[in-house]
Image (spheres, helix red, strand yellow):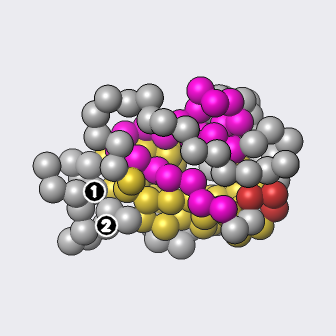
Amino acid sequence: DVVTVGICSKYMGNAYVTGWLVGIDGPVKGRDFRIIHGNNRVGHSYNADITIAEGTGIAELAHCTVVYDGKGNHFFIGPGTGTITYLNGNLLNDWKQLKIGDRIKIGNCLFEFVPFCREGHVWEA
């Protein structure tokens, strides 16, 4: 079954939520996945930073990577090696900045990007 599983953070620093990938179609529909500061590797392994269940067409460790840059208060997405990711219906072949409402197709899952940190809304140091 595809379920959201809570796992204690393996990070010892800032693990504040900065945004979410919200499943809008496919086996993840209705589920949300937290994005934290820095690199967030998306994969089906529990070693991935954003773990999505096996059987979803998502690579084991780094199908793609979502990055939150706290200094610039921006989000970016980059492709994995040997995987296919789509951003707003276009093949993701290089790093792109994410904007609210962007749609990301990873495996057979479709997500919408929802930032918590945005202009005028950031975690204080």
> Which disc number belongs to residue 56?
none
- Work out whether residue 91 or residue 102 is closer to the camera in this orientation and state it: 102
- Closer to the camera in the image, 87 or 56: 56
Q: Does the magenta stretch include residue 24?
A: no
Q: Residue 103's image quarter?
A: bottom right
Closest to the observer: 25 or 14?
14
- Residue behind mark 2: 118
Element type at mark 1: loop
Determine which of the numbered discs, if any, sits on residue 73 in the image.
Answer: 1
Rendered residue at 21%/71% (across/down): 120
In the rendered structure, the answer to whether residue 60 lies left or right of residue 64 reads: right
x, y percentage for residue 118? Answer: 31, 67
Q: Three-letter amino acid code at disc 2?
A: Arg
For label 2, the crowd category at 10 Å Cα-Cα, with few meaning under 14, some 14 to 19 and many 20 or more, is some
Residue 13: where, in percent of width, then height? 28, 34
Q: Give the range drawn in magenta.
A: 31-52
Give the residue furthest to the left: 125
Q: Are marks 1 and 2 in contact (CB under 8 Å)?
A: yes
At horizontal 64% and vertical 45% (from top left) the residue drawn is 5
Residue 33 among magenta residues: yes
- Amino acid under label 1? Asn
